Amino acid sequence: VQLQASGGGLVQSGGSLKLSCTTSGIAFNLYRMAWYRQAPGQERETVAVIDTGHVAIYAASVQGRFTISRDNARNTVYLQMNSLKPDDTAVYYCYAVRQRGGRDVDYWGQGTQVTVSS
């Protein structure tokens, strides 16, 4: 199983980035997908989640600026990030989870760095 995140980089405040996470080895359409982030010295936090029915929820801090989407044909989840702020600086991780046999089966991607300069 692989979750390959990409698209991070350095951007100025107010700019945009689009993250991608391409998966292999899982039945992607059966998994709820999410993006998390972790800034230095802080705990990992949920950024956005999209379920198998394409229903999305967002952290309050990114609501209205970020959009999560998925393409089941490409086994890929995306995070479009607009109006970026320095507080969005973090390593962003993709996450896949499903229930199987009464327990969660989950996988993490390797992370991609997003740095927003002021």
Image (cartoon, grey):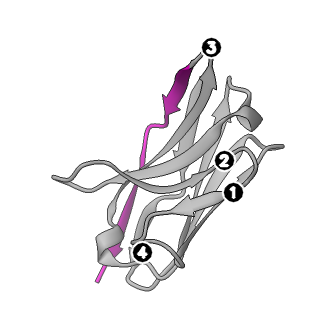
Whichever of callouts 1 and 4 sits on the residue coming sooner in the sequence is 4
Residue at the far left in the pictured view: 41
User: What's the mark number on residue 55?
Assistant: 1
Dividing the picture into quadrants, the one containing residue 99 is top right
Circle nearer the viewer, 4 or 2: 2
Alpha-carbon distance for marks 3 and 2? 19 Å
Whichever of callouts 1 and 3 sits on the residue coming sooner in the sequence is 1
* Depth check, front residue: 102 or 54: 102
Which amino acid type corresponds to the residue marked 4 in the rendered image? Val
Circle nearer the viewer, 4 or 3: 3
Q: Main secondary structure of the magenta part?
A: strand
Marks 1 & 2, CB-CB < 8 Å contact: yes
**Can you identify the residue that label 4 sits on?**
11
Give, as a single range, the part of the protein colored magenta: 103-118
Which amino acid type corresponds to the residue marked 1 in the rendered image? Val
Whichever of callouts 4 and 2 sits on the residue coming sooner in the sequence is 4
Alpha-carbon distance for marks 4 and 3? 43 Å
Task: Specify whether 90 is left or right of 108.
Answer: left
Whichever of callouts 3 and 2 sits on the residue coming sooner in the sequence is 2
Task: Specify whether 113 is left or right of 5.
Answer: left
Q: Is residue 91 magenta?
A: no
**Can you identify the residue that label 2 sits on?**
51
Name the residue rendered at 38%, 83% in the picture.
13
